[in-house]
């Protein structure tokens, strides 16, 4: 699979889809807490048969809150990363600079949008969700890794976003319209970010030895392991939030099933769906022929 992207065309596309936060959330645009927020393919609440319909909706909404919170969290490290990547070429390539600064500006907008969502969620849901973090601490850990490892992680996230919207969200008519609109507008801009990050990965890999690139891919996998641990912690937090919001304490067996099913759902949402995306694997193949097979074999662990 060949990917042919360039900074100029991507910049033009980004400018065409640009939107404003106040057009999406606030005023008469309110969340409907009588509806699901997340598609079942990501939330995976139906398999918890010991929950009734209302409890499944509550858990689905908790997962929806977590979804946008975690996107905001990762964009807290994507933003400085993109700015750092843009800086060396400020005086040499105006189009590249503008495209990357547009990328960074849109990530800053998404962070703001997700904060606005969390405020609206807290007001309407009535129970504050316990979340991993802080974003600054996670950004510090991620950005301490090899820049190519981080670029691969970001590319994974960008293609993950595309898969979620196109495969699970776009045609799900049962989701809350406002939450679905948030995800649609996020997807519209992330579609361009996936192309720009592909170019960033190729730039970073261009002058590196195969051994160095292999080490960077191992670094990407190590970052995935860090996030897997964080997702396990978030699953425990979601159980605590669910108990407070539903006023139901699950027994030991139910808690075990909850943790197992929801951790695996989180793993697919944030790890497996990005690692196995064909476009992500195509870029890995372009910089390290054969390495994509290792990732393809590992991805089912997170399915």
Image (spheres, rainbow, N blue to C red):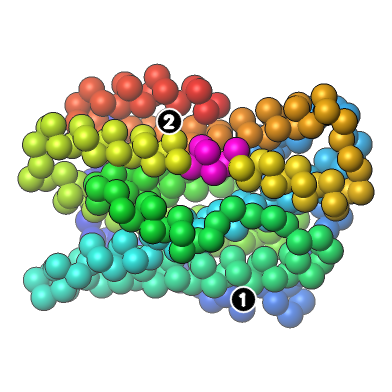
Density class for disc 1 (Cα within 10 Å; few <14, some 14-19, many ≥20) is: few
In the rendered image, the vertical position of residue 165 relative to residue 209, given as above or below: below
Q: CA distance from mark 2 to mark 1?
A: 34 Å
Q: Is residue 271 magenta?
A: no
Residue 277 seen:
no
At 52% from the left edge and 28% from the top edge, which residue is drawn? Answer: 302
In the rendered image, the vertical position of residue 106 relative to residue 206, given as above or below: below
Of the 4 image quadrants, the one containing the C terminus is top right
Residue 23, label in figure? 1
Give x and y (percent) for residue 252: 83, 28
In the rendered image, the vertical position of residue 260 relative to residue 3, given as above or below: above
Tell me which numbered mark, 2 or 1, is placed earlier along the sequence.
Answer: 1
Which type of secondary structure does the marked residue at label 2 adopt?
loop
The image quarter containing residue 3 is top left
Q: Is residue 228 magenta?
A: yes
Relative placement, left or right, of 282 versus 246 is left
Of the residues tagged 2 and 1, which is closer to the observer? 2
Which type of secondary structure does the marked residue at label 1 adopt?
helix
Residue 37, label in figure? none
Of the 4 image quadrants, the one containing the N terminus is top left
* Magenta: main secondary structure: helix
Relative placement, left or right, of 232 versus 298 is right
Tag 2 residue: 276
Give x and y (percent) for residue 39: 69, 42
Bounds of the magenta segment: 227-232
Give x and y (percent) for residue 149: 29, 44
Instruction: Using the image as rendered, state which of residue 239 and residue 167 is in the foreground.
Output: 239
Give x and y (percent) for residue 133: 55, 57
């Amino acid at each position: 699979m060949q990917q042919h992207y360039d900074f100029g065309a991507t910049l033009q596309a980004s400018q065409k889809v640009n939107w404003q936060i106040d057009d999406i959330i606030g005023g008469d645009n309110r969340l409907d807490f009588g509806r699901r927020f997340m598609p079942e393919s990501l939330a995976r609440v139906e398999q918890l048969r010991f929950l009734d319909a209302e409890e499944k909706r509550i858990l689905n909404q908790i997962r929806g809150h977590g979804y946008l919170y975690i996107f905001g969290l990762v964009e807290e490290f994507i933003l400085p990363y993109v700015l750092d990547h843009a800086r060396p070429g400020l005086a040499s390539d105006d189009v590249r600079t503008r495209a990357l600064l547009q990328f960074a500006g849109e990530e800053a907008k998404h962070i703001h949008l997700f904060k606005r969502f969390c405020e609206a969620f807290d007001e309407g849901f009535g129970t504050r969700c316990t979340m991993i973090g802080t974003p600054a601490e996670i950004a510090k850990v991620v950005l301490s890794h090899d820049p190519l490892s981080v670029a691969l992680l970001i590319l994974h996230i960008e293609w993950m976003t595309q898969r979620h919207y196109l495969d699970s969200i776009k045609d799900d008519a049962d989701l809350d319209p406002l939450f679905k609109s948030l995800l649609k507008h996020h997807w519209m801009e992330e579609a361009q970010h996936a192309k720009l990050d592909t170019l960033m990965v190729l730039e970073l890999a261009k002058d590196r030895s195969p051994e160095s690139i292999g080490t960077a891919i191992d670094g990407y996998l190590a970052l995935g392991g860090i996030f897997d641990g964080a997702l396990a912690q978030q699953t425990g937090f979601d159980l605590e939030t669910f108990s407070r919001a539903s006023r139901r304490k699950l027994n030991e067996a139910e808690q075990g099933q909850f943790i197992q099913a929801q951790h695996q759902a989180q793993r697919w949402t944030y790890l497996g769906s990005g690692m196995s995306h064909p476009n992500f694997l195509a870029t890995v193949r372009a910089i390290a022929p054969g390495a994509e097979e290792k990732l393809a074999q590992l991805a089912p662990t997170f399915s």
